[in-house]
Amino acid sequence: MATFDVADIVGALRAVRQDWRASQNRSREPGGRELPSPEALGQWVEQLKGVLFPMRLGPPELRQESEDFYVGHTLDAALHALYAQARLELRHEARQRADAAAPWPPEALDARALEATRAFAASLPEIRRLLDSDVLAAFHGDPAARSVDEVLLCYPGILAMVHHRIAHRLYGLELPLLARIVAEIAHGQTGIDIHPGAAIGAGFFIDHGTGVVIGETAVIGQRVRVYQAVTLGAKRFPTDATGHLQKGLPRHPVVEDDVVIYAGATVLGRVTLGRGATIGGNVWLTHDVPPGGNVTQADSRNEPRAGGPRLAA
């Protein structure tokens, strides 16, 4: 029978953990897990999908006459789960703030978690309305779509937006770790990477989707359509006096209403794409585009050193 030196490996792993905790000024925390669980949040998102779209993303045996009962029962479980994960994030954040003169007492952190959970619950109708607008945008924007049900059940861009609408609300409620975990679950499933901080208006359509990247401070208006491999990213990363990256600065594009960005386009920096602009495939863009502008790959390649990009007539 094969044997393994499990005890030695356990001891070596413990030593590595201790080294890491010492390097990060972390003490061992008794009493269970310190951080939110991606597994628990994955189950939580699945519950919310059923709450938001019970007859499409809920259990297969659900009947319409039982819809409200199912939504109520599932929502209650989901909110308790969110409260538990929010408590973990807020307590972890408080432990990491070693420079805080007066750390938050646990009761105050729990009250914050409860307030955030209630605020999230109150926002669910608006999240559903936004998702309805995304589904309709995909249905009307894709000639291959035969029904709104097909769009909701099959389109990776819609799955990514379900996660993003949820994650963005968590981000706004100052639960950034929960928000990032929810966003990364969709990233892993779809190949679409949307930071939860990105502000995205109604009727957003990601066609095909794989390889789309949208940064934290991007601002996207209404009825915007993007195709696969589009990047809305940062051009540069300013550092502070100690050489560390400055976080939270506006560094991603502003995309106004009714803009279309075709496959492979890369738009970098805090530039503005004006209302109704069209950005062609494989364009590399680092300058503003006026409303109604039409930028092609050749235009961006021959872009002048100063001023905005050349625009097709």
Image: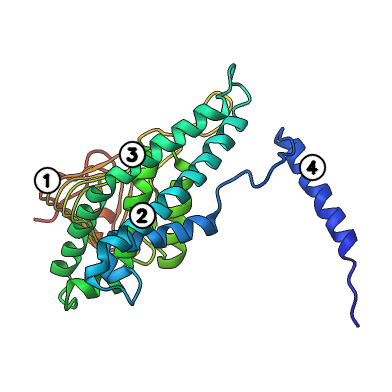
Is label 4 or label 3 in front?
3
Q: Find the distance from the CA under tag 1 to the CA under tag 3.
A: 37 Å
Q: Amino acid at mark 2?
A: Leu
Q: Amino acid at mark 1?
A: Pro
Bin the neighbour count of mark 4 within 10 Å (Cα to Cα): few under 14, some 14-19, many 20 and up.
Answer: few
Outermost residue to the bottom: 1
Question: CB under 8 Å between callouts 1 and 4?
Answer: no
Bin the neighbour count of mark 3 within 10 Å (Cα to Cα): few under 14, some 14-19, many 20 and up.
Answer: some
Seen at 32% across and 56% down, the residue is: 72
- Going from N to C along the chain, the mark reached first, 1 or 4, is 4
Seen at 77% across and 47% down, the residue is: 17
Q: Kindly indicate the quadrant of the structure image that contains residue 218.
A: top left
Return the residue at label 2.
75
Is label 4 or label 2 in front?
2
Numbered disc 2: secondary structure: helix
Question: CB under 8 Å between callouts 1 and 3?
Answer: no
As drawn, the label of residue 291 is: 1
* Residue 140 picture location, percent across and down: 13, 68
Q: Amino acid at mark 3?
A: Ala
> Is residue 290 among what the camera can see?
yes
Locate the C terminus and report the quarter of the image it occupies: bottom left
Q: Amino acid at mark 4?
A: Asp
- Going from N to C along the chain, the mark reached first, 1 or 3, is 3
